[in-house]
Image (cartoon, grey):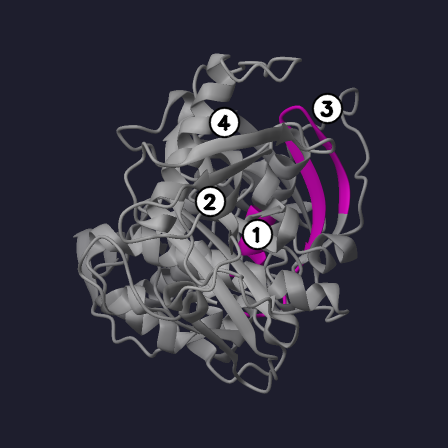
Amino acid sequence: MPYLLDHALTPQPPGWPELADRRPVVAATTTVALMARYAQRASGRVAVGVYDVRLENWLPAQPATDVTVQVRPEAPDRLRVTFVGFASGLVRVADDYSTSRPPRWPVDLDTEQPSAMSAREFYRDRWMFHGPAFQGVTSFLGHGPSHVRGVLRTSGAPGALLDAAGQLLGYWIRSCADDRFVMFPVRIGMVELFGPEPAPGTAVVCHVWVERYDETRVEAHMQLVDGQQVWAHVHGWVDRRFDLPAELDEAFRWPERRPFSQLMAGGWAVATERWSDLAVREMVLSRYVSGAERAEYDLMRPARRREWLLRRIAVKDAVRTQLWGTGSPEIFPAQLHVIDPFTRQTGPGPTGRVEVSGIRGLHLPGFSIALASCSDIAVANAHPLAGLQAERPSEVGLAVEPAGPAGEEPPTSLDLDHPWWLRRLTAATTAVARAAGVHPSLPQVTAASRMGDQPGVVTVSLTVPSHEGRPTTRAYTVTCVEAAVGVLGPESGSAGRRLVAWTTVATSAPDTTREALMGA
């Protein structure tokens, strides 16, 4: 089934040798076409309809998968076809197609407006992920509040024509909704066929009527017209909409150009899980790891997988930010391989050095990686070794605190007793205490300010006075930002927001003691 290479969910560099990293899967409509083919083979008759299609799991095309297919008669003209563990549907067979065809649906021209993009741009800009064998939309005729029309052509790949009809529905969502643009079919109520599939290259007009949609589902009906005759009706096409925020859409479509992390001053990347759906995590995971790293992830205990992935995202985005700054145009996350001691740890925090290297022909300069994380947030910085400051810390103190009431405005003056400031100073003090390995009562705030271009970002200066066992006074600078968290923890604060504070620079006061010299 080589055409399934054009139904691969994850962009990867051209010529990427690991096909599994591209996640080619059997299209839902290819599954419907195969159901009809099995029913025809078993009955010796023509498949004229497929009903109650349930799509339970992705059917991967790489690595190769053996699937048990059951075909069981349920009536003289109906056979239940089941791809065990993946999908099922009821196929109606007859001696021939019906001689009467339904009328074409009327078009609401009063509410229809022209498309703002061409079909070529539709695929070039990755509004759809499909390759040439499944790029069946050739032009848009218009769309309105509850419909979209377009011209389709089939390549001859099984199910490609119906898949293109589903892509029109995807275009409608992107044109009319504000977020949750990623969606895939989970159920098809009925597909009625009134003739054989049009020959490859035939122009087919498709009219999609959207019956209802909400945050999680969209349900639509479709009519496909070959010439002046209706070829197929589809009723009860249901797509599940996935919880991917609109601000991550470009990163999802262009992982080689855009980071999933928030990029902060100083090259820091803050990675949070801004989605509440394990299926979305799987999609993001496939964009960030290669096969070897995926094997590490699969071996992790489920409770630690989220943090493992966030650490990978933060590190790779921090490195790619540095490389993009030097003119490297496109770097896919899978081209970077991370060695992280977190993989080998079973306790609350990893110890050891994080290393990053390029794979599959990507030559990577040396980086010093600073990284810290908790269960749902990771921060990382990648500093080129050529200009490494001796005092730059290899370990980062991280603190996460509730963000306070939603919509709270910061005070206009530097009032450090204001609750808005107190929460941030608490987070900064905790971060320094963890970096220095001291009690939270020891760090002392010496200065605090907000960034002019990013008022929500706070910089706090603190010192840890000399004390027993540590004769040197150390100064720290802490960055504190507010971050959105999709999967809420017990202390996530209102609306899934957290304060994240981390140490960015640690310097020692001049001292000639043996301990200070060894530290330098």
Residue at 27%, 48% (x, y): give it: 468
Image coordinates for residue 119, horizontal then vertical, percent: 75, 53
Residue 502, numbered circle: 2
Q: What is the magenta range?
A: 140-167
Q: Nearer the viewer, mark 4 or mark 1?
A: 1
Q: Secondary structure at mark 2?
A: strand
Say which amino acid is labelled 2.
Trp
Q: Which residue does the numbered mark 4 point to in the structure image?
A: 213
Residue at 38%, 46% (x, y): give it: 466
Crowding around mark 1 (Cα neighbors within 10 Å: few <14, some 14 to 19, many 20+) is many
In the image, is residue 263 above or below residue 196? above
Give the spatial CA distance, label 4 vs label 1: 38 Å
Give the spatial CA distance, label 3 vs label 2: 56 Å
Q: Which residue does the numbered mark 3 point to in the structure image?
A: 108
Say which amino acid is labelled 3.
Asp
Q: Nearer the viewer, mark 1 or mark 2?
A: 2
Give the spatial CA distance, label 4 vs label 2: 41 Å
Q: Is residue 138 left or right of residue 169?
A: right
Q: Nearer the viewer, residue 87 or 292?
A: 292
Give the spatial CA distance, label 1 vs label 2: 10 Å
Q: Are marks 3 and 2 in contact (CB under 8 Å)?
A: no
In the image, is residue 222 above or below residue 472? above
Crowding around mark 3 (Cα neighbors within 10 Å: few <14, some 14 to 19, many 20+) is few
Residue at 21%, 63% (x, y): give it: 71
